[in-house]
């Protein structure tokens, strides 16, 4: 969805960051696991909400599904169509999906619910488009549980919490299980996967965190500069360590 990156002002920059993250082996493994939990039969209809640049839509289609991707960002949809010609991607909101009642056998939303204004309403729409026995899979990170090794732990905690506070629902991923249960889904299961970053590829994300903290007044310019400098030195000396907990939850309609 367009809201997937309201913290970013440059869609091209976000797409570049997503490319780096999605190309990682652990990210590919997590996507594959989310597809397995959908339990799709060949030819089944599945909708990928907040499809971004379309990678999951293309991968689901390659697995034999009738995959439909939805997003509100024209730049994302254009990137998806340019990268994966022939995939079905459409402009739509998470609470107003372009499918009839019970038309889908699978629903997937990856790193989306933390920015939606009303996650329960989006899940109610998921339930509407799913046929009985259809599967929903939600994937997302807990923005308030990011782990960053630093010689300035108090400042690091302040930066992480300040960045999380800029999002509508930074801790929604840890609540996926209860969200699904409250939404009328059964056979609910939850997994936690951890993405570990030890190279400079994660620095744009760290820069975004500290800039959000500086912009909101949680840290001063001097503190932000000192913290970024430490992380840059860690990256240069091979001592960078960032861990991101990712929750994967699935349920049955």
Image: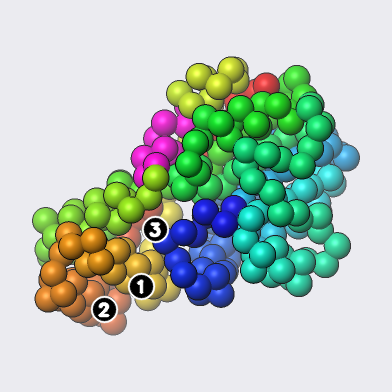
Q: Is residue 14 visible?
A: yes
* Image location of residue 102, percent across then percent down: 79, 26
Residues at marks 3 and 1, CA–CA distance in whole angstroms: 13 Å
Residue 81: within the magenta?
no
Task: Return the disc, 3 or 1, that comes first in the chain's sequence.
Answer: 3
- Where does label 1 land, which residue? 203
Is 171 colored magenta in this rendering?
A: yes
Q: Give the residue at x 45% y 66%.
A: 8
Q: Nearer the viewer, residue 8 or 157?
A: 8
Q: Position of residue 65 (x, y in %)?
A: 82, 44
Earlier residue among tags 2 and 1: 1
Residues under labels 2 and 1: Cα distance? 8 Å
Of the residues tagged 2 and 3, which is closer to the observer?
2
Boundaries of the magenta span: 169-177
Q: Main secondary structure of the magenta part?
A: helix
Where residue 47 sits: x, y (%)? 73, 43
Q: Tell whether label 1 touches label 2 (CB within 8 Å).
A: yes
Q: Quadrant of residue 228?
A: bottom left
58 to 179, vertically: above or below: below
Which residue is under mark 2? 232
Q: Secondary structure at mark 2?
A: helix
């Amino acid at each position: 969805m367009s809201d997937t990156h309201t913290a970013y002002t440059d869609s091209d920059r976000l797409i570049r960051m997503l490319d780096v993250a999605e190309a990682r082996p652990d990210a590919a493994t997590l996507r594959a696991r989310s597809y397995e939990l959908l339990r799709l039969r060949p030819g089944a209809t599945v909708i990928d909400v907040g499809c971004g640049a379309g990678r999951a839509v293309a991968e689901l289609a390659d697995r034999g599904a009738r995959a439909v991707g939805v997003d509100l960002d024209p730049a994302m949809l254009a990137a998806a169509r340019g990268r994966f010609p022939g995939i079905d991607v459409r402009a739509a909101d998470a609470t107003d999906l372009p499918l009839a009642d019970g038309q889908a056998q699978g629903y997937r939303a990856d790193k989306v619910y933390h920015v939606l204004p009303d996650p329960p309403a989006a899940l109610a729409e998921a339930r509407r488009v799913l046929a009985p026995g259809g599967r929903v899979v939600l994937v997302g990170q807990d923005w308030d549980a990011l782990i960053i090794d630093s010689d300035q732990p108090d400042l690091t905690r302040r930066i992480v919490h300040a960045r999380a506070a800029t999002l509508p629902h930074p801790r929604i991923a840890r609540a996926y299980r209860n969200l699904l249960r409250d939404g009328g889904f059964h056979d609910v299961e939850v997994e936690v996967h951890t993405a570990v970053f030890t190279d400079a590829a994660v620095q744009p994300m760290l820069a975004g965190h500290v800039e959000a903290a500086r912009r909101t007044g949680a840290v001063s310019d001097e503190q932000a500069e000192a913290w970024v400098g430490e992380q840059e030195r860690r990256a240069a000396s091979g001592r960078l360590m960032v861990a991101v907990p990712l929750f994967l939850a699935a349920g049955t309609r």
